């Protein structure tokens, strides 16, 4: 009899990607400690975002690992959250599931290489890198490359996790992720 792998087991590729991104972000932070002002309590960018299915399930798995009282409190916050409001995980200017935060939260505020109408540009939080006019390539995260890796990890996860080989939707709000039944 074949057993279905647990979501925890199927999240290995996602967790590996998270580790690589965390290493990259830590390296940027070490090179530019004075230029990055993002800290605990700096939560202006913590909005209600949408996630790919792999990220939604990873967040749900992390929530299920919390003590029941805390998990219930977070679920209640998710039920009451407004789609255009602050992230339901934000409480007292801190993330309640910081260790399990999605990739966008991990890279937010750092220099991201994006393309606008095909023209490359580097974007970052206006509070960070004030007065810096030139950044080395090692301090810039290629968002297209990161998103390509995330989409590939998501596709593999969905093929293995969802019965039809795909999720019932392409994106989940953070609140929806927190209310997923595993």
Image: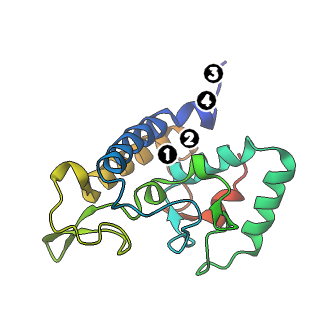
Q: Which residue is mark 2?
A: 161
User: Eyeballing the image, is 150 above or below 176?
Assistant: above
**Mark 2–mark 1 CB contact (< 8 Å):** yes
| Residue 2 badge | 3
Quick one: SS at disc 2?
helix
Q: CA distance from mark 2 to mark 1?
A: 5 Å
Counting from the top left corner in percent of width and height, residue 34 is at: 35, 58
Position of 170 compared to 144: left or right? right
Locate residue 122: give its quadrant. bottom left
Instruction: Decide which of tag 1 and tag 3 comes sooner along the chain.
Output: 3
Q: CA distance from mark 2 to mark 4?
A: 8 Å
Instruction: Decide which of tag 2 and tag 4 comes sooner along the chain.
Output: 4
Quick one: SS at disc 4?
loop
Counting from the top left corner in percent of width and height, residue 24 is at: 33, 44
Instruction: Decide which of tag 2 and tag 3 comes sooner along the chain.
Output: 3
Residue shown at 31%/49% (left/top)?
28
| Residue 5 badge | 4
Quick one: SS at disc 1?
helix
Counting from the top left corner in percent of width and height, residue 39 is at: 51, 60
Position of 76 compared to 98: left or right? right
| Residue 158 badge | 1
């Amino acid at each position: 009899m074949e057993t279905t792998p647990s979501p925890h087991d199927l999240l290995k590729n996602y967790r590996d990607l998270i580790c690589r991104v965390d290493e990259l972000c830590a390296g940027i932070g070490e090179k530019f400690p004075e230029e990055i002002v993002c800290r605990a309590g700096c939560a202006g960018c913590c909005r209600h975002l949408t996630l790919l299915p792999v990220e939604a399930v990873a967040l749900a798995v992390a929530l299920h690992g919390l003590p029941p009282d805390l998990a219930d409190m977070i679920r209640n916050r998710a039920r009451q959250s407004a789609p255009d409001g602050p992230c339901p995980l934000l409480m007292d200017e801190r993330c309640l599931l910081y260790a399990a935060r999605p990739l966008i939260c991990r890279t937010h505020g750092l220099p991201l290489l994006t393309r606008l109408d095909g023209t490359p540009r580097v974007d970052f939080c206006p509070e960070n890198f004030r007065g810096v006019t030139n950044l080395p390539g090692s301090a810039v995260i290629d968002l297209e490359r990161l998103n390509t890796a995330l989409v590939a990890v998501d596709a593999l996860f969905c093929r293995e996790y969802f019965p039809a080989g795909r999720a019932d939707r392409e994106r989940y709000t953070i609140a929806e992720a927190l209310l997923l039944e595993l």
